[in-house]
Amino acid sequence: MSRKTALALQQIEKRILLIRGQKIMLDEDLAELYGVETKALKRAVRRKRNRFPDDFMFVLTSNEYSTLRYQFGTIKRGQHSKYLPYAFTEQGVAMLSGVLNSGQAVKVNIAIMRAFVRLRETFAAHKELARKLEDLERGYETHDKQIHAIFEAIRQLMAPEQKPKHRVGFEVKGNIVSGPKT
């Protein structure tokens, strides 16, 4: 992978957001990448709405959008659309290439798909690392119990041996006196 391609993937990855438990891209980011106006992208999607079921594309709620706005800093008045943005999942982005039908859209779409794959691989690697860490922690808990048992056994071995004391004298059982104890 060339340095230019790696940089392009990093720029795309920065635009992939996590909303409703899904990795998505906003319409304005996609429009910029595709080299079209956001309203043109939205118009093309509305014309072919049947290609975008809810698991491919959804409209952000006003609460989600305002959370995003605060998360990414103050947005200048008039800079962004007054309409709520579309959020496209990975499948929705794939469907966009068929709707926009330009050479630029196909190239950008390939780069976006690679970015989604790379994020998925990174996420899987983190999941695997988390699982291994959890296994290690469980192992240490078991080891701690075993080490504690070893120390307890060593303490018992180190404790001075207590011999039973021999009593001196005679033992009386009822009215009968028996001989000396040994």
Image (spheres, rainbow, N blue to C red):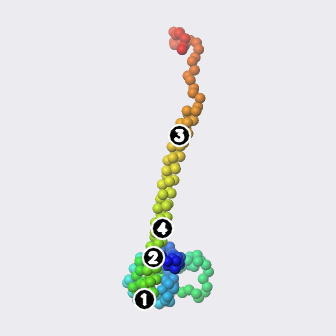
- Name the amino acid type tagged 1: Ser
Determine the secondary structure under disc 3.
Answer: helix
Write the residue at 53% across / 40% down: 150
Query: How far across and how far down the image is residue 66, in percent?
Result: 56, 78
Residue closer to the observer: 161 or 28 = 161
Neighbours of disc 3 within 10 Å: few (<14), some (14-19), many (20+): few
Residue of label 4: 123
Determine the secondary structure under disc 2.
Answer: helix
Spatial distance from mark 3 to mark 1, Cα to Cα?
A: 71 Å
Residue of label 3: 150
- Name the amino acid type tagged 4: Phe
Mark 2 or 4: in front is: 2
Spatial distance from mark 1 to mark 4, Cα to Cα?
A: 31 Å
Spatial distance from mark 2 to mark 3, Cα to Cα?
A: 53 Å
Residue closer to the observer: 2 or 122 = 2
Instruction: Judge whether 130 appears above or below 147 on screen.
Output: below
Determine the secondary structure under disc 1.
Answer: loop
User: Marks 3 and 4: CB-CB under 8 Å?
Assistant: no
Instruction: Find the residue positioned furthest to the front.
Output: 2
Neighbours of disc 2 within 10 Å: few (<14), some (14-19), many (20+): some
Q: Earlier in the sequence, mark 1 or mark 2?
A: 1
Question: Residue 102, labelled with which disc?
Answer: 1
Query: How far across and how far down the image is residue 43, in percent?
Result: 45, 89
Query: How far across and how far down the image is residue 124, in percent?
Result: 46, 66
User: Marks 1 and 2: CB-CB under 8 Å?
Assistant: no
- Name the amino acid type tagged 2: Arg
Question: Residue 114, labelled with which disc?
Answer: 2
Query: How far across and how far down the image is residue 52, in percent?
Result: 40, 81
Write the residue at 53% across / 36% down: 153
Spatial distance from mark 1 to mark 2, Cα to Cα?
A: 19 Å
